[in-house]
Amino acid sequence: MFEVLSIILVFGALVFFHELGHLVFAKRAGILCREFALGMGPKLFSFKKGETTYTLRLLPIGGFVRMAGEDPEVVKINPGQEIGIILENEKIVRIIVDQLRSHPQAEVISVERIDLDKKLLIEAYLDGELHRWNVHPQAMMVSHGQEIQIAPWDRQFGSKTVRQRATAIFAGPAANFILAFILLMVMALSYGTPTNLPYLGEISKGGPAERAELKEGDRILQVNNQAVQSWQDIVTIVSQSPGQELTFIIERNKEQFTVPLVTDSLDVEGKAVGKIGVYPPVTKEFGPSLNYAGETTWQFSTLIFKGLGMLVTGKVSMDELSGPVGIFNYTYEAAERGMAILLKWSAILSINLGIINLLPLPALDGGRLVFLMLEAVRGRPVDPQKEGMVHFLGFAFLMLLILVITWNDIQRFFF
């Protein structure tokens, strides 16, 4: 159950932080965010807080933040249509689109003119006279029993500057890099990070060091009369002495003593290498942990970019890629190996999600950023219908690619 729960928590956290990045910076720009969803498909659970509905959906294949203006409004009111209105302080706060008999408190009018985008007004004939009402900028429309908040132009995605929109889009991938850094930081503070000090770390059971009664935390002063200043000095001497007796001068509790031991000889790529069964010393201090998290985030990012380059150049084939099934399997294996491995694996996945989303491909955040760059260069936005079509085709291609990779995963792991 721990492994299964780990898979759910890992993927939930990756998607949650990604979409949270979009949500936070979209709201900071003043964009109306209608929905924050984890998963796709039918709703399993939802609640509303403020202007946003938070939803858990059935299919665990991603998530989204639905911003006003990104999609066509689903409810339209045309001149000549009968609607119901409810006023507070001489402003319309509720617009009843249908099922008018269910709202006897509403004033029924026949719309002559309506502008819920910029001027926020409705004109209609009432008792033979033309009346004009101002609409509250947070008015609700009621259609088929569902309430939908109107989105004036200044609350829509398209009304914001290129910089504000780009920030809201880039914030998703950026949140994944931040999450990876946090996970690595937690791992380092909890389990320690390797240091180069001349101390012994964890002692392997049954190894030469345990048989010689060495202990974790022992300080190594000399090995075979050679002074050592770092852990790397110890590794160099031991690795070059396979199957040989070495004499260690140890300091423990401010006392010094001599310990002889014979190294094990291991074959590494056809070469004999000495080992004594000791892990490097670790520290749980904040400074080294901070450095470790930053350096490791950078290293993982570099490796993933190199892997993408090898895929583009053909050095890595599509058959070697893993989709959802493969990632679930590897996450299960990481959970079996312990929390430290799971934290590091989760950080890798988070960085990978951030980088993949920044690729300049339609339907991904990187593709949307490309269109914003074009808008900045041209001085005007690309036709929304053309951009929407490009993203739709890109999404269809990505879904097809995921199906192909998933089939490869199924064959690799189950056949």
Image (cartoon, rainbow, N blue to C red):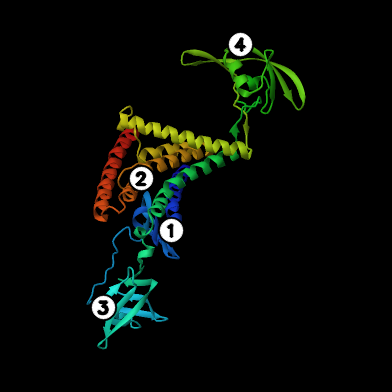
Q: Which residue is mark 1?
A: 29
Which numbered disc flags the more N-terminal residue, 3 or 2?
3
Q: How many marks?
A: 4
Circle 3/circle 4 CB separation < 8 Å: no
Q: Name the mark nearer the viewer: 3 or 4.
A: 3
Please report the residue visible at 36 percent of the width from the left and 40 percent of the height from the top: 325
Screen quadrant of the C terminus: top left
Q: Which residue is mark 4?
A: 244
Which numbered disc flags the more N-terminal residue, 4 or 2?
4
Q: Position of residue 330 (x, y in %)?
A: 42, 36
Is 325 or 113 nearer to us in this picture?
113
Q: Which mark is residue 111?
A: 3
The amino acid type of the residue labelled 3 equals Val
Q: Position of residue 368 (x, y in %)?
A: 33, 49
Q: Which residue is mark 2?
A: 366
Q: Name the mark nearer the viewer: 1 or 3.
A: 1
Please report the residue visible at 57 percent of the width from the left and 36 percent of the height from the top: 291
Please report the residue visible at 38 percent of the width from the left and 43 percent of the height from the top: 358
Q: Name the mark nearer the viewer: 1 or 2.
A: 1
Is residue 254 among the parts visible in the rendering?
yes
Is 275 or 183 nearer to us in this picture?
183
Is 221 or 25 nearer to us in this picture?
25
Is residue 207 among the parts visible in the rendering?
no
Does 100 sit above or below residue 231?
Answer: below
Circle 1/circle 2 CB separation < 8 Å: no
Which numbered disc flags the more N-terminal residue, 1 or 2?
1
The amino acid type of the residue labelled 2 equals Gly
Compute the Cα span from label 3 to label 2: 42 Å
